[in-house]
Amino acid sequence: MPFYEYQCRSCQYYVEVMQKITDPPLRKCPSCGRMTLAKLISAPVFRLKGSGWYETDFKSDKEAKRNLAARDTEESKPAEAAKSPAKTDTPAPAPAQPAAAAASPARKRLKHASAAGSARPAGRTLGRVAIFATCYCDVSLPQVVDDLHAVLTHNDIPTRMVMQEVCCGMPKLELGDLDSVRAYKEKNIPVLAALAREGHDLLAAIPSCVLMFKQELPLMFPDDADVRLVRQRFFDPFEYLMQRQQAG
């Protein structure tokens, strides 16, 4: 069953509830008792399965380009055979490196970001952000993190990077390797919980990483207070900006 987020318009009490899709929305606030509890619009929580998941989300750009090149080569063989020149011993020039592969990791590029400045809370957001770069964006597509940082700073949201992080654990969870999931959790959660206690909201550009911290780890470790804290402070970037826009 999905989780739904509620917030009281009177006392601002926030709660997440597991409900059936067909269940009616809750109205009574568990904190103040008033009928002012409202369902929030937030990022959907879902789980992707299947062989295509790793092809689309974890395969490097270099591998993708090589596969495309191989397919193009097979298709062009008949045409090339008719006009190919005599073979020589001259080595072919090395292919140009993709821009993403030549770029430095996102955390290194944005290590200067310190989240300095005044934070302006809005709705459930505290207005100060730490970005979890994720394995994919940190190495393969760091410009995505550059863009996310630029959008946040453009909106006057002090932003910094999570400088100590490992894989969120989703690939290992999909493989059923729960020992590795626990090991990654023991490295990530203390760092993220400390940032949350310092007043940071937590964002990641990859939806599967957001899902890991907002649903999978809380389901696996329901009694861990730090996991619950990270879950409360973790947002999808679009959800985060929408929360702030709705709160004015």
Image (cartoon, helix red, strand yellow):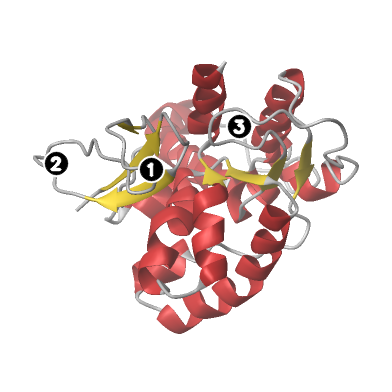
- Crowd around label 1: few <14 · some 14–19 · many ≥20 (10 Å): some
- Taking the image as shown, residue 118 lies to the left or right of residue 71, namely right
- Quick one: 31 or 143, which is closer to the camera? 31
Closer to the observer: label 1 or label 3? Answer: 1
Image mark for residue 111: none
At mark 1, the secondary structure is loop
Where 229 falls versus 61 (above or below)? below
Q: Which mark is residue 32?
A: 1
* Percent position of residue 69, x then y: 51, 38
Does residue 209 appear in this view? yes
Residue type highlighted by circle 2: Ile
Report the front residue among 65 and 70. 65
Q: Amino acid at mark 3?
A: Pro
What x and y, as percent, mark residue 59?
50, 51
Mark 1 touches mark 3? (CB < 8 Å): no
The residue that mark 2 highlights is 21
Q: Position of residue 164 (x, y in %)?
A: 75, 62
Q: Nearer the viewer, residue 52 or 77?
A: 52
Secondary element type, mark 3: loop
Which tag, 3 or 2, sits closer to the chain's start?
2
Residue at position x 28%, y 55% in the image: 49
Q: Residue furthest left?
A: 22
Q: Which residue is mark 3?
A: 85
Residue under the point 61% across and 52% down = 134
